[in-house]
Image (cartoon, rainbow, N blue to C red):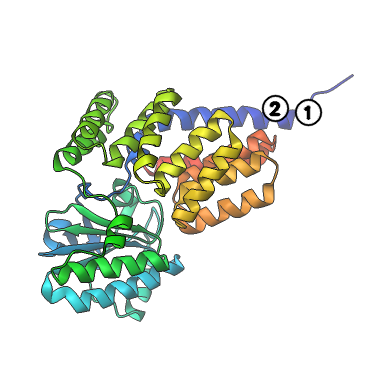
Amino acid sequence: MKTTPLFPFRYKTSLMVVVMTIILLQSGISTPALQTLGVGAEAPDFTLQDFSGARQGLATLKGKKMTIVLFWASWSGQSEKALGQMEKLYRQYKGQGLSVVGINVERQDIDAQALQDMRTVTDRLQISFPNLVDRGLVTFHDYGIIAVPTTVILDRDEKIIFEMSGFPLAGTRDMLHFVAAAFAGKAAPAEVIRKTGYQPDKKAVRSWNMGIKALGSKRTAPAAEMWFKKAISADPDFILPHLSLGTYYQEQGDPAQAREQFQQALNRQPDNASALSRMGLLLLEEGSNAAAKTMLEKAIKADEAHVPSYTYLGYLVGREGDLQKAADLFSHAEKINPMDYRIHLYRARMFEEQNSLEAAVASYKKALQQLLNRQ
């Protein structure tokens, strides 16, 4: 008598359950996936505890002229370099209206050992500016952080005027020029302005922010399309509404309109990592692997800390059969931001397509756990 193995059936059943659960969860957490940090956006407010348990917020910590918010973690080697650089800036310009706020994003749950790890780093580096603990990673997700460390510079009105993922050499140099010019009362060098982003129309920014807020609930989500279109109408060169609207169309199953919006963003900023990455994912989902690979490799070259680019490229090369290169790309993405559930989700999809169901289930479960932690 011919028998049917039970374990593959068990794996497939588990896989289906986990996948369906993730799909249900994703339907209620669209905002962080769509919210992209960018020049001109309003910085989300926050009130968090410091290492001693006292609560402090942006409203009281912000500088009279400029505020630098640094997201960091003790497990990130680049974070120590970023903390040291911010301490230098803080000591140089704090008397002229600069405030620096560190936000530790160690992990979801913070225990005594995690606090000790944070203190060890800041004590050894002799950090004097305030540092807060993002318990539950709420602020991390509100800001849509894709890499650790991430530097966000705000003006006196809490508008983002500079942002940098990771701690790249060239980007750090641009940041230092940007800050120095601001406190010298001069415009930043033209090359720095070109790299740091377009200064959008205020009406466009307000409309874009309204669209992002609309995505916060299923009831108001359909209005997001209207707000993004209003933002584009007010300032066609502001690329964040194009990216948000394109992603909205992509999630609504309209790749043609999504492609149009991503292309509009790329026409204005050809080296924008987010635009390149989103277009790459769209091409990948359409089966245009060669074009997708080109886009994603350009995205990585444009921003070496852009986690989605490594994640999507890892999925692409993995489904083509190069599992070692895929593993390296996924591992690199995790080193930059181990809290990004998409890394596990796309790794799971790769394993599933390779019929490695046990590995797929394990990765889906990790993605599911990270999604549950965000609820």
Residue drawn at the location 24% of the way across and 33% of the way down: 232
- Residue 328 x/y as whole percent: 61, 55
Residue denoted by label 1: 5
Residue at 16 percent across and 39 percent down: it is 206
Going by the numbered disc 2, the residue's amino acid type is Phe
Residue 157 visible in the displayed image:
yes
* Residues tagged 1 and 2 counted as in contact (Cβ below 8 A): yes
Secondary structure of the residue carrying tag 2 is helix
Q: Residue at x 31, y 61 (%)?
A: 191
Quadrant for the C terminus, please.
Answer: top left
Q: Quadrant of the rendered structure where residue 184 is?
A: bottom left
Query: On residue 9, which mark appears?
Result: 2
Q: Is residue 36 above or below residue 131?
A: above
Viewer-closest of 25 and 64: 64
Q: Nearer the viewer, residue 238 or 146?
A: 238
Question: Residue drawn at (28%, 32%), measured in percent from left and top?
Answer: 215
Secondary structure under tag 1 reads loop
